[in-house]
Amino acid sequence: MKIYCGSRANGKTMKAIQLSVEKQMPIICLNYYHKQYIEHRAYEVGVKDKMPEPILALEARRKVIGNRKGLIVDDLDYILRAIFNDNVYYATMVYCEVEKLGKE
């Protein structure tokens, strides 16, 4: 798994949109407002019609059955918080490649 990290307004969602179009993988998002934001940003850059429809995290299991391309998760920390109803401060993974995004 590769994780793109950065503070607010540093291109994380735009990177997810770019990957979604390129890889034809849906973006998993926290809620309906986040989904609308992703779709609006994709529309602004002219790729909404080329991007798979974003999927709400709570609907992901039902909607991705048979999807063999994989998934892209936007704002993983918020989604984990929603799933567990608590802050996740630490986690372990078998493999993770992190790329820092930011305005320089």
Image: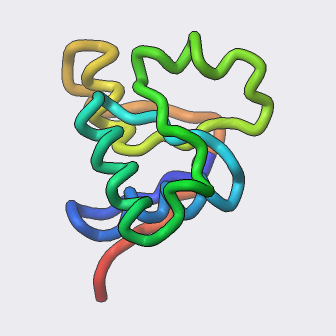
Name the residue rendered at 42%, 23% in the picture: 57
The image position of residue 74, as x and y in percent, is 41, 44
Residue lying farthest to the front in this orientation: 49
Which residue is rendered at x = 28% and y = 40% of the image? 34
Q: Position of residue 71 (x, y in %)?
A: 61, 37
For this orientation, the residue located farthest to the bottom is 104
How far from the left and from the top, in percent, is residue 36? 30, 42
In the rendered view, would you say 67 is above or below 20? above
Quadrant location of the N terminus?
A: top right
- Establish if 79 lies above or below 20: above
In this picture the colour scheme is rainbow
Looking at the picture, does residue 52 appear above or below residue 14?
above
The image position of residue 96, as x and y in percent, is 58, 48
Report the number of discs.
Answer: 0
Q: Nearer the viewer, residue 57 or 47?
A: 47
Q: Answer with the quarter of the image where residue 56 lies.
A: top left
In this picture, residue 70 sits left or right of residue 37: right
Q: Is residue 12 left or right of residue 3?
A: left
Q: Nearer the viewer, residue 5 or 40?
A: 40
Where on the picture, by quarter, is residue 69?
Answer: top right
